[in-house]
Image: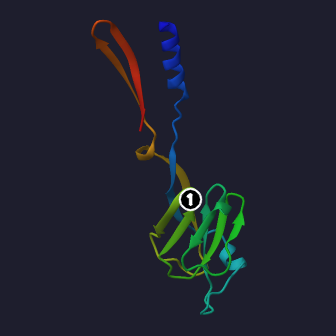
Amino acid sequence: MKLHRILLMGAMLLCTITSFAQELQVVSFQRLDRDLLARTQERLDLNEDPCAIVRVSVPNAKDYIFEGNIIGEVNYRPGEAIIYMTKGSRNLTIKSDRFGSLKYDFSERLEKQVVYRLTLKLIQSEANKTRTLIMPVAGIGTSMSYGAMIGVV
């Protein structure tokens, strides 16, 4: 009987699943002076000025929606999204159904015909992690009883 209770408690412990919440984090934002994409595949804004390009490096780039001073459609390539933005732009908003949204303020205003790389990564959020609590319980009366309480937060 004791063996069955111990096995049952062990099985319950193994069956608790820990899930992790993920969120986006900017790893780096840098200017790529040797990348000539903005000059060779130029796109003009409404004022006929050449645009800057922001290359967003993120896995499964097609799962994201980008908002800001974007000119035309976003070009998706494996592992990156190529975004044409007006010169002087200050920020870019990145949205995802799975990871929420992130508004990133550039460290410098974008210049025309310059390519920038914005690298993102997915991080585990410790605050949203599922936690398990196991507490032994014992009672003394006419007979001794014992057990364990398992709580999932």
Q: Callout 1, which amino acid? A: Thr
The x and y percentages for residue 91 are: 48, 73
Where the C terminus falls, by quadrant?
top left
Work out which residue is located at the far bottom of the displayed protein and give it. 47
Relative horizontal placement of residue 103, taking residue 76 as reference (left or right): left
Q: Establish if 121 lies above or below 67.
A: above
The x and y percentages for residue 33 are: 59, 70
Q: Secondary structure at mark 1?
A: strand
Residue nearest the viewer, comparing 48 with 5: 5
Q: Residue at x 27, y 9 (%)?
A: 141
Residue nearest the viewer, comparing 2 with 135: 2
The x and y percentages for residue 23 are: 50, 53
Q: Residue at x 61, y 60 (%)?
A: 57
Judging from the image, the colouring scheme is rainbow
Determine crowd level at label 1: few under 14, some 14-19, many 20+ residues with C-alpha closer than 10 A: some
Residue 86's quadrant in the figure?
bottom right
Residue 115's quadrant in the figure?
bottom right
Q: How many marks?
A: 1
Q: Establish if 81 lies above or below 40.
A: above
Relative horizontal placement of residue 80, taking residue 110 as reference (left or right): right
Residue corresponding to mark 1: 119
Q: Residue at x 61, y 91 (%)?
A: 46
Residue nearest the viewer, comparing 105 with 3: 3
Residue 82's quadrant in the figure?
bottom right
Q: Residue at x 60, y 64 (%)?
A: 56
Work out which residue is located at the far front of the displayed protein and give it. 142
Q: Establish if 15 lies above or below 3.
A: below
The x and y percentages for residue 148 are: 40, 20
